[in-house]
Image (tube, rainbow, N blue to C red):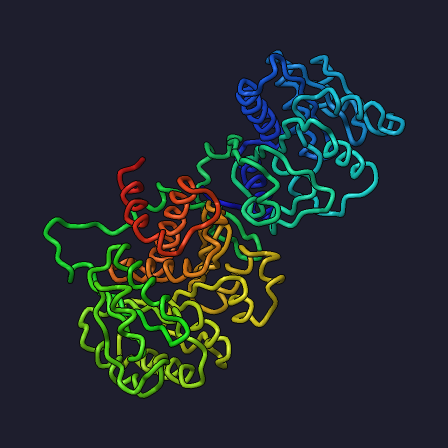
């Protein structure tokens, strides 16, 4: 399913209108579809005849609300409307609502909002159809007081938003302080970016998409019909159906060489566990052979942690990587005829000699002295990159970068708040500017490639906010690279498997207490579930 920005949704609607689906018909389809969804939900509520209050704004979102209320009334539901501003009888959807016998009050004629207080107190379900995708101004005055009354109602009614809760920024996920979180959001045609960005993602409740007829117009390639600027993104929401055809096949007559090699380059005296987690994740993702390039002093510990891995000896290193070990790593990589997938960074540290080692390794890769099947840069490798002048040019393209928000901020030379203020937009824009694939980790991880192509994960799992899960992610992506997936596909599939494994753990154990190693046996389970289609 595609995810759209506000500007992209407007363009889709403009093109739909040009193709014969009028704005008026889209509004009818949206309101009727929302009403059908609400009627279905009403059957699950504990009251016998739920009373529905629709809060109606002055624009198209309010029009959707009026159509929805009219359809509810025709279905036998007790529906009332409260209007932020009066609408005239020349407004066709308002006239239709009046003709359906719906009781309506407008705020302009409601002294001290007395009628609203009574309507809110009596409602079992309240539908927020106040401000839609095109409004981002601060909430003040009467509208603010209306939302305060809804939010203060106790016991809390079931709250539904059309498109999104009032006060939500549909591009960035920012929220106005007056926003009232809802239980269910019904959005139209496609999710919007803000639905998958916090804090809005935490205020929109369950998300349902109602189709409004655009899907029947043969506009699958609508981007090619448009000259919208800035460039239109191709952004999708990941699900099993998207991932299934991308996962590598497993032939019955395969051997370990069939599924490629991974080299995990990391570890230091202070961070012993990270490279082992990455190595085991590569195996769990299906790689045939994994080798650890780690400082000599920590090899015994890693051998216990990951007994299946082989080792690349790096003489001249003790508790940290140093340039003296590089010739031995280069020789090993050169001997792998089909090329190895590389994971650079888990537990590698930031010592000066390690920084020199990483710089020399990048020079060897960029000069094509050695080849690889792709590189995943994670953890301190990202922090070391951020200190290098013109670091994007030093990486073999396209490298896969797996930063959390802090690492992303350092790479971009900005702040964490700036990155988090528009996670999707930042991931898309920086991936394009750097020429590399960005996996911006966090709730609803964003995977972005040059050319404004991206995928958003459906997972927001606090159990995974624990040390080491990023190492598992990096190894999982590299394991798929080793099996021949293109870098973007490997990043998308690896991140999805990682998130799906986390969801399996959360369903069994809750949202706290996970160890990164808990994910490892769940990776093949998640893959099996996806491949069998259920």
Would residue 513 appear left or right of 115 to someone viewing this image?
left
* Residue 119 figure quarter: top right
Residue 450: in sight, yes or no? no
200 left or right of 395?
right
The quadrant of the picture occupied by the N terminus is top left
Between residue 233 and residue 118, name the one nearer to us: 118
Please determine whether, in this image, residue 22 is positioned above or below residue 403: above
* Residue at screen point 31% across, 50% down: 523
Give the vertical position of 359 relative to 44 (above or below).
Answer: below
Q: Position of residue 365 (x, y in %)?
A: 32, 78
Residue at horizontal 38 percent and vertical 76 percent from the top: 269
Q: Position of residue 506 (x, y in %)?
A: 43, 43
**Residue placed furthest toward the left:** 253
Q: Can residue 167 be seen in this view?
A: yes
Looking at this view, name the residue that lies furthest to the right: 111
Q: How many marks?
A: 0
């Amino acid at each position: 399913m595609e995810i759209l920005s506000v500007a992209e949704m407007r363009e889709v609607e403009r093109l739909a209108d040009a193709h014969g689906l009028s704005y008026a018909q889209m509004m009818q389809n949206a309101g009727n579809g929302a009403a059908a969804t609400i009627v279905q939900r009403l059957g699950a509520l504990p009251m016998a005849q739920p009373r529905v209050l629709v809060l109606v704004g002055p624009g198209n979102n309010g029009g959707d609300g009026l159509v929805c209320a009219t359809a509810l009334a025709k279905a036998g539901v007790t529906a009332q409307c409260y209007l932020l501003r009066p609408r005239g009888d020349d407004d066709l959807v308002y006239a239709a609502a009046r003709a359906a016998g719906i009781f309506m009050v407008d705020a302009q004629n409601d002294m001290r909002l007395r009628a609203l207080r009574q309507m809110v107190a009596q409602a079992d379900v309240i539908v927020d159809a106040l401000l839609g995708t095109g409004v981002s101004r601060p909430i003040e005055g009467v509208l603010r007081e209306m939302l305060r009354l809804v939010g203060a109602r106790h016991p809390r009614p079931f709250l539904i938003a059309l498109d999104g809760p009032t006060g939500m920024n549909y591009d960035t996920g920012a929220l106005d302080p007056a926003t009232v979180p809802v239980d269910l959001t019904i959005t139209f045609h496609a999710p919007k970016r803000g639905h998958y960005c916090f804090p809005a993602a935490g205020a929109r409740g369950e998300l349902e998409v109602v189709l409004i007829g655009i899907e029947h117009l043969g506009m699958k390639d609508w981007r090619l019909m448009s000259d919208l600027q800035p460039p239109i993104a191709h952004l999708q929401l990941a699900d099993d159906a998207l991932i299934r055809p991308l996962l590598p096949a497993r032939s019955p007559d395969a051997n370990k060489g069939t599924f490629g090699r991974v080299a995990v380059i990391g570890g230091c005296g202070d961070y012993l566990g990270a490279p082992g987690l990455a190595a085991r994740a590569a195996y769990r993702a299906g790689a045939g052979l994994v080798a650890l390039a780690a400082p000599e002093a920590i090899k015994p510990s890693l051998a216990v942690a990951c007994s299946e891995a082989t080792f690349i000896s790096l003489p001249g290193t003790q508790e940290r990587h140093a340039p003296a070990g590089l010739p031995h790593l280069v020789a090993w990589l050169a001997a792998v005829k089909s090329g190895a997938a590389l994971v650079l960074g888990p537990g590698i540290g930031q010592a000066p000699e390690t920084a020199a080692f990483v710089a020399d390794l990048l020079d060897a890769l960029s000069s094509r002295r050695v080849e690889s099947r792709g590189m995943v840069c994670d953890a301190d490798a990202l922090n070391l990159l951020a200190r290098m002048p013109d670091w994007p040019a030093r990486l073999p393209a396209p490298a896969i970068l797996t930063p959390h928000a802090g690492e992303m901020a350092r790479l971009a030379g900005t702040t964490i708040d700036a990155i988090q203020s528009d996670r999707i937009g930042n991931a898309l824009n920086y991936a394009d500017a750097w020429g590399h694939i960005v996996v911006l980790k966090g709730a609803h991880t964003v995977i972005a490639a040059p050319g404004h192509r991206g995928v958003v994960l459906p997972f927001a799992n606090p159990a995974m906010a624990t040390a080491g899960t990023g190492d598992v992610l990096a190894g999982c992506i590299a394991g798929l690279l080793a099996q021949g997936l293109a870098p973007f596909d490997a990043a998308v599939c690896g991140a999805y498997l990682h998130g799906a494994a986390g969801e399996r753990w959360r369903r069994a154990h809750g949202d706290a207490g996970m160890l990164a190693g808990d994910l490892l046996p769940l990776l093949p389970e998640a893959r099996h579930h996806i491949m069998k289609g259920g």
